[in-house]
Image (cartoon, rainbow, N blue to C red):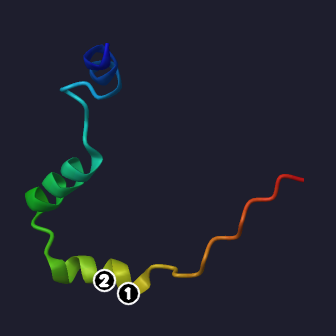
Amino acid sequence: MREILSAAVKPEKRVRVGEALSAIGRKIGLTNDDFAVFESVRDKTPAKPLGFD
């Protein structure tokens, strides 16, 4: 039973977003210095909490 549920929730051929992004970065030659630019311009303001009024 657990094996069936596990296979349904986590199929073998699933796309792993982190691995896909890492592969794209390697393919285009993205370096840590290139990535540092993104971190320096990123908005670090905390998100406003949702209201359910």
Tag 1 secondary structure? helix
Look at mark 2 in the image and give the residue it sits on. Answer: 37
Residue depicted at 29% across the width and 14% down the height: 4
Vertical placement of residue 40 versus 5, above or below: below
Q: Pointer 1: what residue? A: 40
Q: Is residue 28 left or right of residue 46?
A: left
Number of marks drawn = 2
C-beta proximity under 8 Å, tags 2 and 1: yes
Q: Tell me which residue sits at (17%, 54%) in the image.
A: 24
- Splitting the image into 4 quarters, where does residue 50 fall? bottom right
Place of residue 21 in the rendered image (x, y in percent of width and height, measured from the top left): 23, 54
Residue positioned 25% across, 31% down in the render: 14
For label 2, count other residues whose C-alpha is less than 10 Å away and answer few (under 14), some (14-19) or many (20+). few
In the image, residue 50 sits, relative to residue 10, either above or below, namely below
Above or below, 48 against 34 in this view is: above
List the single residue furthest toward the front.
1
Which image quadrant is residue 37 in? bottom left
For this view, does 38 lie left or right of residue 27? right
